[in-house]
Structure formats: structure tokens, C-alpha cells
Image (cartoon, rainbow, N blue to C red):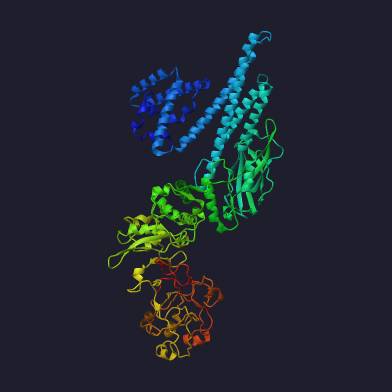
Amino acid sequence: MSLWSIVSHMPPEEFSGLFAEFPRSLRCLLADWLENQPWEFINGSDSFCSSVASGMLAAVLEKLRGAAGSDGQQCQILQQINSLENTYRRDPLRLVAVLRAILEGEKAAVLKRDRHLPLSFHRRQEELKFNVGLQRLQHRVREIQALRDGLKASPQVSVRDPQLEAEAKPPERELSSLILEAVKELEVTKQQVLKRIQIWKRQQQLTGNGSVFEENLAPLQKRCESLVEVHFQLQQQVMASGSELGAELLPRLLERFNEVLSSLVRSSFLVEKQPPQVLKTQTKFQASVRFLLGPQLLKASAKPYMVRADMVTEKQARELALSTHSSTLSESTGEIMHNVVGLETNPSSGTCCANFKNVLLKKIKRCERKGSESVTEEKCAVLFSTTVALSPGNLSLHLQVLSLPIVVIVHGNQDNNAKATVLWDNAFSEMDRVPFVVAERVPWEKMCETLNVKFMAEVQTTKGLLKEHYFFLAQKIFNDHSASFEEFQSRSVSWAQFNKEILPGRGFTFWQWFDGVLDLTKRCLKSYWSDRLIVGFISKQYVCKLLSTEPDGTFLLRFSDSEIGGVTIAHVIRGKDGSSQVENIQPFSAKDLSIRSLGDRIRDLGQLRNLYPNTPKDQAFGSHYNKEQTGKDGRGYVSTAIKMTVESEREQQPQGTAGVPPEAPQPQMFNLPVLQPELHPESLQPVLNPICPPASFCPQPLPAGYPPADSNVNMMVPNNLGTFSSTAPMLSSALGMEPTLPHCQDVPFGNPLPFMPAQYMPGEASQLLPGGPSPEPRDEEMDELPPFVSMVDPPLQSSPRMPPTMDLPPASDCDPFLGLPLEGPVLCNPFTTPQPHSGYPSPNTSCWGLGESRWDDGVRPGHA
């Protein structure tokens, strides 16, 4: 964005006093071309400034005449242009001063309104400043050359004539002063280049937090090469003027030239591709260094120059940075494999690089930490170093550069805290700091900017955080719900508040919670966030306030306050008495949303109608619904689907059971009554006679933890699959059919009611099972399925989702009663009661429970 793009939309009254000597109509024709000229840096009256001002006057007139050709008031514009030319032809420096004043006034107006100028404007001004400085140096070289030529052409002065000798000294003194002035300007321009290199490094560091910048080093390399070229030209003029400069001044000048060249060369050795800032041991990584002046200065060598990579601690990095001379590393703090690479020059691209492709940090030597500093707060770096010979002059220099701070971890569970250390260092470190010093407290306003940049970069979205989000985050990190947004903006936040102190009532820090939100949104919620369907950063209390007056079925999405990486649905329900209540569904994790997406879960819930404030849910989330598959797939299998259901506590609890946790909803399948262990065989005989032959039955005690007597087992009976549930053998026996399940000793019994409901008493096959017995043969293409694992097998005894192990009667005791053979697969106990999280209604899936043991592939849902 240019400065003119802002100024052109501001009221003209704010700039009325700027156009007394330069018409505003002409300013509009020049548009953003005006700010791309070096008016600000032509502030002298010497020959260089006068020549540049004359050229800029000609450029202005040419630009105005070209723009006037397309304007409707061409005659009036041309008259103004002619008047401008007549006014400033004799004094072009005056035009420079007028246009500089106009730009200064426009900048002041924008700063007053927005408090900052466009970043592109700053970059352009910095580039213009360097170009003017370089042009000035080139002009100085030409002046020195002309003065030296004039001294050579002047007649030899006789020493015997004192008057002529006195007249001959001023040109020599003029030459010395001109050279001194040129060397001073060379050093100033060198500082501009070094500052630009530091800016590039700082911008590169900010990319670790998600900032975007121009990584191309070609413009910076061109600057360095241009300055070195002028440096050698000026040095050549100084060497040629040695007799005029004297034996005392010449060595001092040459020393200053060497200092300029050395600092340029050392600063142009950069880490182009940084190693990972969170680095795990025994993990390969890549990096590359680039020598900007290598193609121009490296002396040809039979052997390539080698670059070495070593791991250094923060203390070692500080010692290297503070040493007055280029010192070498005494000891590496870590063992790095494949850490020596050749420095290669590519003539086609004009680059000189060393690429580390398969570097491996084998181990790390930890240093003593200060105070309560943890392992993930310990910073180190990779030191890249080499020794090169430069031409001309065969100057040998030792080059070294440090990477950005690195946190070395040995386990994945350290990654979260290590990222916090890196984020803080990248965001709040200063240029030219002592490694790796960073502030302990920073303004909350800067922290908001950092979190916003990180969020947008991680989620890869253009929709950042809003003012309301910052307010919620401030309340969370400061644990203050009474301050206003403006009060928070004036506060500062500490590193301890960011990632050392546990949040009140929680088991995690602020960063750990925020990073969980980042990960969840990046993996599962990117499109929802980009469409602004998620409010996200909002407290549960404020949600209740928002939704309390909304109609039944209004809902919104927010990130869980109490869990890391969870998103929940808050919705309004109304009871029979008309009172409203806001309920929060148990938060969904990334794993939950990978099983069934958020959009499909919202579609499943009929009680959700309008997204807050009043957008119908199908209109808001329709594009996020997945197409439901129906019919059979390509292999002939009937499609299945997972559906989510939520029952509110109000609907689950009967009158007078407040405070009792609701039972988890069960899938809708037919109910198989369970026999009680105290039921005696003789009492069952009238019922069992039509089904099973008389046999002894020895009931066993029911172990603790088993479903209560009045519970029903939700069992699915497949249809037309050739496999029956636990009731199938008894039914098939009554029908005179051969059972396909050998025995079901793991299916418990116990109920004082009759063994079979009336609808399952002997009769026609169609009355016993809908659809009758399966005529469909076993799938011949499938391998024989392994038997079901018994619940009493040791591997499943420790499973939290399985009921306690039961002491069941021997198979020989049950087989006569069931009329089954002794061999065959065993069915697992199918019922498991999910434990909902406290305070949330529990979502339930029909057919297959999330995370539950799944039945055999041959048993398909939908045939209950």
C-alpha cells in the first residue's frame, strides 16, 4: 500500500496549506510516483545535489505532460506545467524543497490518524536513501579523479617562488579533504547496508512465528556488490594520491578501507535456510548458508572452502558475539553428524552457498540452568564457520554466523513448551542483542499481535482474531474479569504468565491451552473458522448471557475453557414450563472430529436450529455437510453410518431425581431380557419346554459391577447374514433349524420375567424373526473369521470399557440347556456404559459406539 492510496481518500481540507506553491491538481497527477523519488535525501547545495535536482525537475515535467494527455482539462494542466517550468528552471533545488514539504505534511496527517505509515513506504524510502548514498560516492570518485587530473596538468611550481608555492597548496588540501569526506560517506553507506542485513535477519526470525517477508537475497546481494565495487574504486584513487596525502594520512585511510571491507564480508555470510527451532535429537534436518560476496571476492582455489556446523550453548554464543576479534569455537555442545559441507559457487545463478542436507543431531550436552529454568527454556544455536581467501590482495578471513535460537528436545511431549520458548524469543527479541537475551515482560498489545500472526499462519487463514477475542484472552491470562478492554491494552504480560504459571482451576498454562486450540483449528476447523462460523474465544458465562434471551434451538460454537484442544456446542433448550437453559455439549477433540465432522454432527442434532444470532443451520453449515452414502458399495456391502445424538439432563432425569447423573442413552435395538441368577430351573420349565429339552441348570452368582436386574441388553440381531445373536440358537431349535453359533457361554442371563417375550414364543418363522431364517450362504470369498475373544481372556481384563470378569459356569453345564455343541466362537458381552464428562450432556452414536469394541464385519447394523 502506497502513501498516496491513503492520502487520496482523506478530506482535502487537511492538506489545504501544503499546495501554495504547487497546485493540488498536479499533485494528483503525480500520484504515488512522487513518493518514489528521493526528495527527502537531496538536502544540500553542492554540485551533486544540484545535478540530481536538475534531473528530477526534468522527470517531473515529463511525468506531468504524460499524465495531462489523458485529462479532460488538458489546456489548463499544460498551462500549469509551463508555469512550473518557468518558476523552477533556474532553481531546481527549490522545487525539491517544496515537494519534500508536501510529502512531510502528508506523512504527518497519516501518522496522526493511523499512528503508523505503510510498511512498503518505509522499505521504499530506505532503498532510495541507499541509492542516493551510492550515487553520491560515485560522484565523489569522479570529483577526486578530476582533481587529480587537474593537479597533474598544472605547471610545476618552483620552490624558489614562495608566492606561487602558497598558491599550489590549496588544491592538495582540497584533495585531502575531498578524500576524507568520501571515506566518511563510504562508512555511512556501509552502515546502511549492515542495517539492512540486520533487518533481513530480524524479518527472517519473525517468519518463525508466521510473519511473511521477501526472502529473496538477490537485492541485498546487489547492494553489497555495488558498495564493494565503489569501495575498490575509491581505494584505488587514494592509493594513486599517496604522494599528495602524505605518509601519515595514507596508512590511516587504508586501515579504514580494510575495516569497511572486513565488516561487509563478515556480515554478508548469512544463514539462508534456518535449522528447525525446535529440534529433536536423532532427527535429520536441513540448513543452508550463503556468502553474498562470494561470487565477487572469493579467490579461486584448488580445493573448495569447507563450512562446518557445530552446536553451541547460549553462553558460548554470547562469548563469540562479544569477542573483539574473530575467535574459533573451543568445544561443541552436541554431536552433529554430516556437519561439514563445501562452499560452492554457482555462476549461472550468481550465488555462493553451502547446503546441509542430511544433518543429524546425535546427542546434546546440557549445561547448567539458571534458577527454575526448565529444559525447554534452554536455548542453543548452530554455529556455521569457514575460512576463506579474498581477492584482490589475498586477504584471509574467518567467517562465522549463528543460527536462530534452537530448543533441543528428546521427547515429543516437550514440543509444546519448546514452541512457547521459541515463540517468545522470536517475537520480542531486539536486533543486535547479546545472544539470546529477551525481555521478561512485554506489552499485552504486542502479545495480541503475536498471537494473531501465529494463529493465522498455523491455521492458514486470512481471518484473524477480533477485538472480542483479545478481550477474552486477556481475561484468561490475567485472571481478571473486571477490567475493560482499554485497561488490558495498557498492561504488560510476563513469560511466567504465558507458559510457566498454571491457569487457576486448570492443569495447564495459557500457551498450552492456546496451542491446543491452534492444533484443533488447523486440523479440523479451518473452513469453519474462515467462514466465521465459530465464535471460539468466548467464556461459558458470556455465552449464557448471549443465548439466554434467544429462541429455542439457537446455538454457537466455542473453544472449551477446561480442556485442551476441544470445541463445544452451546445451545438453548426450553422446558415444559417455558424456562430456558443453555447447555454445553461435551467438547469434541480432533480425534472425535476425524470420526465424524463438525458439520455432520450439527446436522445430526435436530435440537439445533439457528446459528447465533439467527442464521438457519443448514444455510450456515450446508457447504460443510458430507454426502451420506446409501445402498451397497462396490463390494456388495450395505453402507453404514455413524449418527450423533445428545440427550439433555432435563430430558433424561425424571421428576425428583435432580443431582443424579443420567444414564447413557442406548441404541434403539430389540431388548433381550436377562435371567437373574436366583431363578431356579424348575420355575423355568413351563417356559423352556417348547424351546429346549429339560436339563440341569446351575446358576452362578452375579459378580459386582454387572448391569442391574432391571436393565435390558441392547442386542442387534442381524438378518440374512447366516449368523445369529445369543437368542438365535434357541429360536432355531424351536423351529427345527440347525443353529450356526456353537455356544454363547459369555452371554449372561438373569431376570425374574419369563425367558422370552410373547412375540418370540413358538410360532411361524416370520413371527419369530422378521424376515425369517437367512437363506443367504456364507460369503465364500472371505477367509474364515477368527473366534470372538472371550471377556475372561487376560488381554481384555484391564480394559476400562469392559465389564468386570465374570465367573461363568462351565460350558458343559450350559450346553445341555442351550442345546449347542462344545466348539465354536464366543460372543463378547456387547453392553458397555459410556461415562459422560461431568457437566456436559453426553453425545452418543447409534449402531457403533465411538471407541467401543466393534462386532464382526459380517454382522451389520440396521437389521434389528
Name the quadrant of the N terminus.
top left
Judging depth in this view, the residue of 750 and 604 nearest the camera is 750
Q: What percent of the width, then of the height, locates residue 421?
A: 54, 51
Q: Outermost residue, left direction?
A: 577
Is 251 displayed left or right of 858 in the figure?
Answer: right
Residue 219 seen in the current view: yes
Q: What percent of the width, then of the height, locates residue 612?
A: 34, 56
Q: Quadrant of residue 574?
A: bottom left
Residue 397 higher or lower than 527, as above or below: above
Is 654 displayed left or right of 342 in the figure?
Answer: left
Q: Outermost residue, right direction?
A: 302
Name the quadrant of the C terminus.
bottom left
**Total number of numbered discs in the rendering:** 0
Residue 86 higher or lower than 765, as above or below: above
Judging depth in this view, the residue of 780 and 331 nearest the camera is 331
Q: What percent of the width, then of the height, locates residue 307?
A: 66, 43
Q: Quadrant of residue 653?
A: bottom left
Residue 355 seen in the current view: no
Judging depth in this view, the residue of 618 and 494 nearest the camera is 494
Q: What percent of the width, then of the height, locates residue 229?
A: 61, 29
Judging depth in this view, the residue of 670 and 315 nearest the camera is 315
